[in-house]
Image: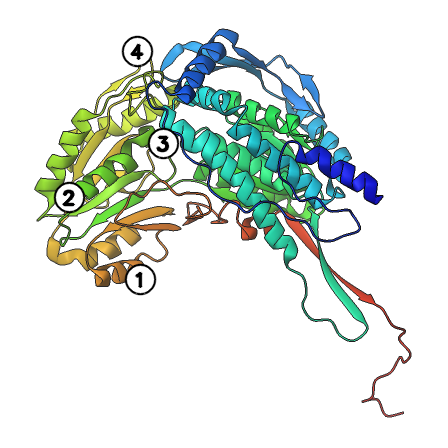
Amino acid sequence: MSRSLCLAFSRGLRSSAPWAIRCYSSPVFSFPKFKNEPVLTFAPGSQERENVVKAIDELKASRYDIPCVIGGKEYRTADKRKQLCPYNHKEAVADYYCADKALIEKAINVALEARASWESTPAEDRLSIFWKAADLFSGKYRSLLLASTMIGQGKTIHQAEIDATCELIDFYKLGVNSAMELYSYQPKLHSPGVWNRVDYRGLEGFVASISPFNFTAIGGCISGLPTAMGNVTLWKPSHTAVLSNYIVFQILREAGLPDGVLNFVPSRGPTFGDTITSSPHLAGINFTGSVEIFQHIWERVGVNVANYRTFPRLVGETGGKNYHYVHSDVTDITTVVNSTVRAAFEYQGQKCSACSRMYVPDTLWPQVRDGLVNTVNEIKMGSPEDFTSFMTAVIDSKSCANIADYLKYAESSPDLSVVAGGKVDDSVGYFVEPTILETKDPKNKLMQEEIFGPVLTVFVYPSDQWEKTLHLINETSPFGLTGAVFTKDRAVVSKARQILRQSAGNFYVNCPSTGSVVGQQPFGGSRASGTNDKAATPSYLQKWVSAQAIKEQTVPILEWGYPSVDK
């Protein structure tokens, strides 16, 4: 590329974002340093609040018709479905079409055809698309992303803001910075007459991304970042998040993502899973969802492993049975109560990191109980279009029925008593009251199983058995995602960290088990909670490249033998 052409190309991109562009002959390029996207307040009378209200009205009036998009072409199948509004299930927010096996196979073939061109695209050109998309999320499309997440996934304006804009923007911009950090690792040692280097190639084949309903940002992250690293991707969104995910996909296309590189393929889970795992070209799966589904996918890959061209990379984040532990030395009951209410009941307990089990010493339980009950009684539950709502509806009828079954069990169990809430009303939307239960049995199934709803179960332990209780926490649930410890004593923090070391991928002290911020608390857990790959970090991106070490000899090799060989 000529210098004049390179400068013209640079000026063209600088018109929309502050990239530093290189000529292809130079190995140096950079992007602005990552910093977290500011969280807007949407205060009454603010312009951003008015913009979101307008976007909600426009979305409800338009009702998107969402096709499968493969290689830039739209496909509408006979399997047409509706995405319902969780807080008013008589309303559909979008129509969408499910791909069958043949269409998924077509998407695989189209992606593979696009692979060579995309994988050989210079890294700065690939990454610049995602940086630009982040700026579009932040500005031009902020209100649309928020509105689609609110009406489609039942998030309040604050919960939508910290997810669909701030976290998504942060995933992409930190991801770009992390890619630069990964690419910058090159061998520092070179023998005389040798030049060593590492090329970070995209994976040989295609990546399948399977995203959940509860975070728009996760959909954009697990489909976008593997693509940014030079891979071609099939994106299967959740049936209950198709609208917001489709908008993210379209924004990526506007940012310059070539057709065929990322393909939007709503489909039935079993059909998609069986089709991708049967392809010899499967190179990776990026998954967020339930333990059972991820285990099934892993099993399918194992059955077919001899048929693959390469060993597929498996990355998964599943769920959690996250805990709050309160030590008897705590005097700040207000922080314990507010932290627990936020962690247990924000977004109706549908965060992977939501607190659903709590351990409180008998000496503090009366104060903590009263504080929790009084606060829960103040919570307003309703439509997210009412900006004063703290909670809205759970995602769908299946989830609502599942939670209702757990609550019926709680009512009939002699080990459990209802402290607050416990009622379900699905007549208009899928509403479940914020519920607090007390258990006499610390191994009750409500202390072990993920419910994924606004249900908190508390075990009251003898205050002199605090260390034994820490071991109990560690041994009770198969999950290992998040946990929080509340104490004033540094020695207790140290002991808790030691005993609970494997119990949480994100460990919090004197704050909620939820609310990780991209770039500050990298998120992920192990045990049954997933592969703990910490999204958008260099270690995460390394999963989506295949490194090639290159040794180039720059001087002649004049001997075939070695000095140790006696001639």
Indicate which disc residue 350 carries.
3
> In the image, what residue occupies the spot 25% across and 20% down?
424
- Indicate which label's residue lies in the foreground, 2 or 3: 2
Tag 2's secondary structure?
helix
Query: Would you say the residues marked 4 and 2 are in contact, meaning their CB atoms lie under 8 Å apart?
Result: no
Mark 2 vs mark 1, CA separation in Å: 25 Å
- Indicate which label's residue lies in the foreground, 1 or 4: 1
Pick whichever of labels 3 and 1 is earlier in the sequence: 3
Instruction: Tell me the kind of residue under disc 4.
Output: Ser
> In the image, what residue occupies the spot 44% across and 14% down?
56
- Pick the front one: 311 or 531: 531
Pick whichever of labels 2 and 3 is earlier in the sequence: 2
Screen quadrant of the C terminus: bottom right
Q: Is residue 417 visible?
A: no
Indicate which disc residue 427 carries.
4
Mark 4 vs mark 3, CA separation in Å: 20 Å
Query: Would you say the residues marked 3 and 1 are in contact, meaning their CB atoms lie under 8 Å apart?
Result: no
> In the image, what residue occupies the spot 24% across and 53% down?
472
Tag 3's secondary structure?
loop
Instruction: Tell me the kind of residue under disc 1.
Output: Gln
Indicate which disc residue 498 carries.
1
- Pick the front one: 87 or 9: 9
Instruction: Tell me the kind of residue under disc 2.
Output: Ile
- Indicate which label's residue lies in the foreground, 4 or 2: 2
Pick whichever of labels 4 and 2 is earlier in the sequence: 2
Instruction: Tell me the kind of residue under disc 3.
Output: Gln
Question: In the image, residue 476 lies at what x, y percent?
Answer: 28, 49
- Give the crowd class for mark 1: few <14, some 14-19, many >=20 residues within 10 Å: few
Pick whichever of labels 1 and 4 is earlier in the sequence: 4
Mark 2 vs mark 3, CA separation in Å: 25 Å
